[in-house]
Amino acid sequence: MLGFSVWIPLCGTGVRMLVLGCLFLALPVSAAILQVQITPKVSGENLQPASFRYQTYAGETFSITRASYLVSDFGLQRDDGTWLDISNSVAWMDFEQNRDSARLAAVDPGEYRALRFSIGLNTNLNHADISQFGAAHPLNPNLNGLYWSWQGGFIFLALEGLWRNANGEMDGWAYHLARDTNCTRIILATPLVITNETKAEIDFDLGALLNAPRPLSFGKDGSSTHSRDGDPISAALVKNLASAFRVHRVTALTDAEIAVAHPTPLYLPEKFTPYPFQMSSTFPIPDLPRDNPLITERVELGRKLFF
């Protein structure tokens, strides 16, 4: 708020009067960042890979060796019930690759009452031209290994492991959830105060995904699915997804955590020019380090040193 004074001449008189007032300027509000971290768990404990410590409702002992999935279309619900959709938001989560977070930039600071996202992709994104996705993009097939080239579209969720069958023998199981109709929206009611950089920690209970409300048995229902039309296993997974997620906590990141997430560029000159990087649309975009930006001055230095 800025104070101001104006001298106004009164009509027909030589008298001036002082008018005091306040001018409210619409100052720009800095955008915030929301980091969503999803941790795979089983019955409340952190997932132990390749461990035969889990059981289905039918008493079948099993392990989980792969948990890989796509998350997209994040949104935040305001107090008035409307939604703030975060455009172009997509992430690849993979337990083995230690990928468990999505950083959502340009989020309006404020108070929200719910978070939503989809397990899977909308139709347009699921059938987009994959050559447009750079090397570090979560939808690059060479990165995530979730693209079905023979069928088209992505695998939304890939769960794999081993189980002990009725004969006591070790056998494999693989549940692959895919196809447009199986993209599943998750809505989690939780108060969120987004300021600067905020972290929402979410638990993804794989035990609940396999057991409730529609329990699955490898022996009775089958040990594999590729989400064909009318497949009962994929239908059960979709039904169970909603109850498999729970908000663990929401916190504001410290300055030290923000510094790690946003490394300061190294040895930048006082004046520099961003390099106009261009390449073929069919060639994967290289993953350039965030602390060493590509600038014209360094490209020219490289030419002089190597040529």
Image (cartoon, rainbow, N blue to C red):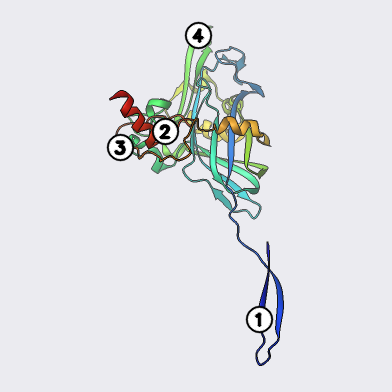
- Whole-angstrom CA distance, mark 2 to mark 1, is 63 Å
Q: Position of residue 25 (x, y in %)?
A: 62, 62
Q: Position of residue 200 (x, y in %)?
A: 63, 36
For label 1, the residue is: 8
N-terminal of the two: label 4 or label 1? 1
**Residue 139 numbered tag:** 2
**Callout 4, which amino acid?**
Met
Q: Nearer the viewer, mark 3 or mark 1?
A: 1
- Whole-angstrom CA distance, mark 3 to mark 4, is 46 Å
Q: Position of residue 286 (x, y in %)?
A: 38, 30
**Callout 3, which amino acid?**
Ser
Label 3 sits on a secondary structure element that is loop
Image quadrant in which the C terminus is located: top left
Which of 233/181 is in front? 181
Which of 3/73 is in front? 3
Label 2 sits on a secondary structure element that is loop
For label 4, the residue is: 170
Crowding around mark 3 (Cα neighbors within 10 Å: few <14, some 14 to 19, many 20+) is few
- Whole-angstrom CA distance, mark 3 to mark 2, is 15 Å
Q: Nearer the viewer, mark 2 or mark 1?
A: 1
Which of 253/75 is in front? 253
- Whole-angstrom CA distance, mark 2 to mark 4, is 33 Å
Q: Nearer the viewer, mark 2 or mark 4?
A: 2
**Residue 281 numbered tag:** 3
